[in-house]
Structure formats: structure tokens, C-alpha cells
Amino acid sequence: MDLKMIDRKGLIREAYRIEGITESECRSIFLDWALNLPDGQDSSAAIAGLLDAYSAMPETHPMTLVLREGLAAKPEAKRRGGRKARLKET
């Protein structure tokens, strides 16, 4: 997987370069990164690609910890809206 396609804005790359970054700051960066994933992109595969790309970084780096949490979290089912959702409920 191409790192430039996974981290198009370089958010994760920059997080690893910031000295003294906190886990809270990494969570905020991660959220921004996740919201900017292209439609149809498998987030789990993207996170795994990031972890692979930055495997040389310390395991205790806050961004590594956040990425591991993101990989472990199961995405919730997407909500169906509009007419299809109303028809399904009745």
C-alpha cells in the first residue's frame, strides 16, 4: 500500500516528527486523518499500512499507541438514512 495514498496530508508523518507530542494530540490528529480517508478506503487496512510504515518508531510513541487502538476498535455498522431506513423499521 502506498503511504502517500494512506496519509495524503502527511498528518501521521508529522505526528511522528513532533517531539514531546501527547497521546491526546495524537488522537486529535488521528481523527482528522480518519475523516479525510477517501470514500471506500478500508480504515483497518490503512491503519495496518501506517503501522507497517512506521514500525521503526518506538512501540511507546503516542501515535503508535493510538494507531494500535484504532486497529483494535471495530467500526460500527453504518447507519442507513432516508427512505430505506424507514421502510426497514416498519
Image (tube, grey):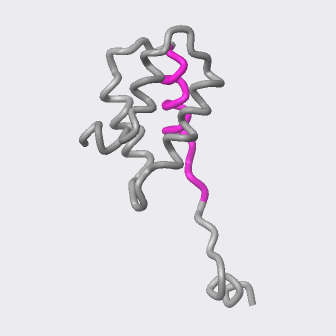
**Extreme-left residue of the structure:** 2
Give the x, y percent position of residue 23.
61, 21
**Whether residue 19 is situated above or below residue 7 in the rendered picture:** above
Give the x, y percent position of residue 19.
50, 9
Q: Residue at x 32, y 15 (%)?
A: 56
Per the rendered image, the range of residues in magenta is 61-76
**Whether residue 50 is situated above or below residue 85 in the rendered picture:** above
**Extreme-top residue of the structure:** 20
Q: Residue at x 39, y 33 (%)?
A: 10
Q: Residue at x 67, y 86 (%)?
A: 88
Q: Main secondary structure of the magenta part?
A: helix
Left or right of 43? Residue 86 is: right
Residue 81, quarter of picture: bottom right
Question: Can residue 66 be found in the magenta stretch?
Answer: yes
Give the x, y percent position of residue 4.
29, 39
Question: Can residue 79 be found in the magenta stretch?
Answer: no
**Frontmost residue, 41 versus 38:** 38
**Frontmost residue, 32 versus 90:** 32
**Whether residue 90 is situated above or below residue 5 in the rendered picture:** below
Left or right of 82? Residue 42 is: left
**Frontmost residue, 60 versus 24:** 24
Give the x, y percent position of residue 69.
55, 33
Residue 26, quarter of picture: top right
Instruction: Look at the image and tell me in which quarter the N terminus lies.
Output: top left
**Extreme-right residue of the structure:** 90
Left or right of 82? Residue 61 is: left
Instruction: Look at the image and tell me in which quarter the C terminus lies.
Output: bottom right
